[in-house]
Image: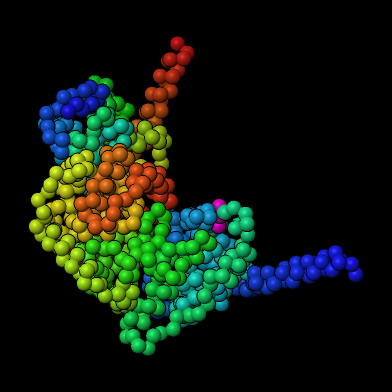
Amino acid sequence: MSLKVNGHDHQIDADPDTPLLYVLREELKLNAAKFGCGLGQCGSCTVMVDGKAVLSCVTPLLLLEGRQVTTLEGLGTIDAPAPIQRAFMEEQAAQCGYCIAGIMMRAQALLQKNPKPTDEQIRAELHPNLCRCGTHMRILRAVHRAARLMDSAALSSTTQGSAQ
Amino acid sequence: MTKPKIVIGIVAGLLIGGAVAAFAVAWRPAISAIEPPAPQSFDANLVKRGRDLAAIGNCNDCHTVRGGKAFAGGLAVPTPFGAIYSSNITPDPQTGIGLWSEAAFRRAMRSGVDRTGHHLYPTFPYDHFTNVSDEDDRALYAFLMTRQGVHAPARANELAFPLDQRFVVAGWKLLFLRRETYKPDATQSAEWNRGAYLVEGLAHCGACHTPRNALGAERLSATFSGGDVDNWHAYAINARSLSPVPWDTEALFHYLRQGWDKDHGVARGPMAEVVSNLSSVQESDVHAIAVYMTSVFGPPGQDRLRKADEVRAQIKSPPSQTTPSNVAGASIYAAACATCHETERPLPYGGINLALSTALSAPDPRNAANIIISGIQPVEGERSPIMPGFGSSMTDVQISALLNYLRGRFSNQPGWTDVERTVQDARRMQTVFLGIQPGPHNAPGGPTQRD
């Protein structure tokens, strides 16, 4: 079947009941999303489908006909990191980092829907994602920082677009 | 006197008489304000008993908003007539019940009238609390008056005229409020009577599990036949129960105490808060409730017992699958659900075999849709049941196909109608629900209470 990931169509040769996570990591070599529990309980496999955070380990391919999958690789690159990635680096929000790709994706989905979330909203939204290292306070700061970065990015692109 | 004058006279007389009668029905005097009593003036044992009683009454569920201060009120309780906001029952003198005497508190519990004489809406289930003894009201009063006072003014209800006029409630009470208190049944055991006293009174189980009439009163002819609450169906808990395996005292006790039962699954929706509270009270009271409810369910007939055996046999050795007519739903089930629901991993951490699910035998697919969309959130800081939500990965069409398949495969009941609309409603309500409800404290209160 055909699967749209990060804006590109891919022909996937896999059973329809294959979890999206396996396809991303093994066929497409997109290794940001991690295998944690395999039961949809830890959040390390989180990606976005049509702009919403989804647990890719419990999402079989057959649900994804005609839908848009976005992984962390689709947001930015090492040379040009996306605001969410810059913010997590600037706040040094990763310790071992295993959970962070999933957390960034859920935070990204939150910021797309709510550009200025409160502490409480971020905490509630990130509830399904576990971090065993305990960088929670840095993660919180990073999401706030990402919100500011996105805000100024949006601002500068509008001024560039209209004034110049 | 001419004829028209006589008519006018009669009409005027009737109007005045009616007004006087209405006034007599609706008017209640204020009870004098008291100086808020010092917390240390209450006996500690009385407060402790009140604490357990408040948990059995599930008071915190309606009187606390998500993330808010305990018992400070302000939660929107949706009703067919509009939202009614729960009141502040902390001892704050301005916005809570700090100025209420015990007599004022008892009057509110018995007849739904606040200290100043205003009628309270029956979302506050005083139609059950008439059964609560003076002694228990005293303990509840002592517990509430020793809580932290919170300044939280009441929120205005969202009711249309004339329902926004509180005297209208007096008419409702004339029609529907029974004022008798609980009378023990001498032919039954003390434990049964204890359970009946709690279930019919403070625990107000019928408030959700009994269907309501057009005026919002419980239909007494259908007590415990299943009702509605917050876009969830509260199952029938009498002889009309649709659970694939009949309930018995042991199963009820485990479910009410631990929040789940191996043959019936995990308590969810508004019931999650109930079992969370029941996990914290005296075991003997929960057992008494189970004993009484067993008699309300009644002994299952031969037919139900036979079907239950069939279900158990089917779980042990699943019949080989023929090609299903609903291929879409079957594939989704096999790929997304069976990985947890058909493993040997026991409850509450593994998924229940769906052949045991009451949600799939329920009259409508609301509960099943709610669970598929939102999953089961684990309790913060505790080991507890968990299921990921599929609301973001499945479309309404996919969830509907799945629900139709589950109904066909795991229930003996006829297919559901309007499944897709139910799914859309569930999705919309979920957004609202998650915004206003307290988090799922859930079932088991402490790790020691779980296996």
Q: Is any part of residue B123 visible from this angle?
A: no
Give residue A17's quadrant in the image: top left
Quadrant placement of the C terminus of chain A: top left
Quick check: is B291 in the magenta stretch? Answer: no
Q: Residue at x 60, y 57 (%)?
A: B164
Residue A31, placed above or below residue B394: above
Q: Residue at x 41, y 41 (%)?
A: A118
Q: Nearer the viewer, residue B433 or A129?
A: B433
Q: Which residues are magenta?
A: B154-158
At which x and y percent is residue B420?
34, 43
Q: Residue at x 40, y 78 (%)?
A: B197
**Side of B441 relative to B229 (left or right):** left
Q: Is any part of residue A110 visible from this angle?
A: yes
Quick check: is B157 in the magenta stretch? Answer: yes
**Side of B221 relative to A100 (left or right):** right
By secondary structure, the bulk of the magenta-drawn segment is best described as loop
Give residue B448's quadrant in the image: bottom left
